[in-house]
Image (tube, rainbow, N blue to C red):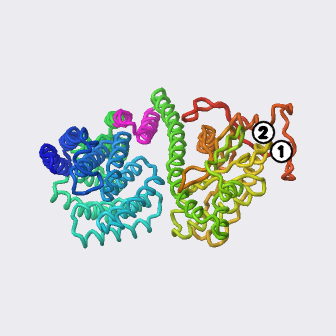
Amino acid sequence: MINHDIHAMLDTADTLLADARTFFEASNYDESERCALEVIDILEPHAERNDVGSERDSSSQLYAIINSIAHAYNRLVTINVPRSNYELSLRQAETGLRYSDRIGNDLRTAHLISNIAIIYTDLGMLDKALEFSAQAQHRYETLGNKQQVALITLRTANILRQLGSYDKALEYLTIALATLQEIGDKADIGHVLASMGVLDGTRGNYPEALEYFSRALAIYQELGNQSAIAQSIGNSGWIYRHLGMYDKALECFHRALAMQTVLGEKSCVSNALGNIGELYAIREFEGYDVHKAEEYLLKALRMSEEIGAKTDANEFHQFLSNLYRQEKRWEEADIHFQKFYALEKEIRNDEANKQAEKREIERREAEKEREIAVSQAAADAKHSSTTALLHRVLPESIATRMIDGENDISDYFDSVTILFADIVGFTPISAGMPAHVVVRFLNYVFGTFDTIMKKYGCEKIKTIGDGYMAVAGAPIPCDDHAERMALAALEMQQDIRLPEEFMEYLPAGTDFGIRIGLHTGSVVGGVIGDERFVYDIYSDAVNTAARMESHGEADKIHVSEEFKQAFLGADRQGQPQKSPLSPKSPMSLHFAERGEMHIKGKGIMKTYFLEQSR
């Protein structure tokens, strides 16, 4: 039975969502946002009703309510990305995903995941951008949506360009352009042409870049896409500057600045101001003017700080420092250099936090995949072939207990040592590898780690993307877990001799290193789930070990104070016992103080690098 009040609300929501799209395509973000928020205000209070049908019935009013709410949140995401409101847009995307997952709307879910990939691209977190792009592409391919697959291909091409894989980027752009020309979507064709222009500009092919920007601009002007028009004009200014045509470059930058100011695109405004300031500082420019350079660079700096664009602010501080030094304004030069230096350190720390966040997301995904694999193995655990498989995916002692019929496996371990390891520079290393070679590469490296863990009596827990997690002291307790894991970590740091099949794909001078973090503490280890289950360890100590890795350095073992104390042993006068497992004596190891540092989510911690004495 139709609820006529709800029917009227849904009609209003449909009109508002259509208006929101129209306003968005005209770059009128304020009005587009107003429409989307109004939809949420109207419908969200009714999202839990039980008298308007089932949420999984696509013909029900409840389904329509939830679908429109998810649509509205997706629109808000697309509005807040060009405004550089990244944290807000991520929260809105997550909320939208919860609604779309409730009703099983795969297309809406794919759109939201695709927009999350765009956010991470803008943030420079390219590994996450590729991860979410792959998820979205898989969903679009399943749905047969060729246009969205082409747009994901375009986005992947832009990421490859940022990673320096220019030939591969051009290949992806060509594929995307062919598909979009077949479909006939002018706006998206314009986006591909603009990306081809950026690629040629990056490679120094300036005349070709200008031609692509001109073709894209013509399309955007026909469609009235003000944001894209401004971007194309600014891109042309970038090329004119490289060609030494400074007057034309200045004209383009000012036109782009005026349009982006009206549109409220703060990140673009900041970049345009910076471009103008840097242009005025070029001595070969007839309009060379130090005062104007300073004026525009300071404006760009203030805006980048306002929106939290640390990388841009860092660049502006450095440019201002150089400008003031050139003018012998030493005090001001020093002020901006100090701010540049401090911000550079902060950005590096942010990158460490981003890596830790990446681990947490990948860990959740890995758990889902492993649950499926283990549940399939456990279903026929009585059969010998399945029993063997179960022993491969679970610790042997845990698999045996499950096969014997034990339920609710959960054990507390008062003291264990946890290891997290990461392949440093994995993204650029893997960028030039075919997918099947990437898999073989990881299998080879992780297989080497598995052998080391078995040698020292440690247990691999899981692999997480290009990361590796292991524990000593669980599921079988031992008193020398810190020593076992220390020796295993040291052996992991030794050179891994890669077979020739991988060497041809590695860029010249590739620095292949392992970053390791160790922490000692208590954990709960157990099998989670009834039909779908997975063995894992849980506690704050696990999070701390992950932080040790993400805040560490390449080819070093970063350890906590708790690990140091466990290794030395409180009752051994600060001296470790000799290892029964290796001819290497732990007496030859020492702890190099790293000092106190701020660890995300932990506060100030005293940490060390574990090293082999020479």
Which stretch appears magenta?
Answer: 300-327
* Residue 296 image offset from top left, x and y in percent: 32, 36
- Relative horizontal placement of residue 535, taking residue 14 as reference (left or right): right
Characterize the magenta stretch by its predominant secondary structure: helix
Q: Amino acid at mark 1?
A: Pro
Q: Is residue 351 visible?
A: yes
Residue 312, magenta (yes or no): yes
Name the residue at 25% across, 57% down.
Answer: 58
Q: Which mark is residue 567?
A: 2
Contact flag, marks 2 and 1 (Cβ < 8 Å):
yes
- Relative horizontal placement of residue 577, taking residue 46 as reference (left or right): right
Residue 164, magenta (yes or no): no
Secondary structure of the residue carrying tag 1 is helix
User: How many residues crowd mark 2 within 10 Å: few (<14), some (14–19), many (20+)?
Assistant: many
User: How many residues crowd mark 1 within 10 Å: few (<14), some (14–19), many (20+)?
Assistant: many
Q: Which-is-in-front pick, marks 2 and 1?
A: 2
Q: Which mark is residue 586?
A: 1
Q: Amino acid at mark 2?
A: Phe
In this rendering, the answer to whether 332 lies above or below 285 is above
Name the residue at 85% across, 50% down.
Answer: 584
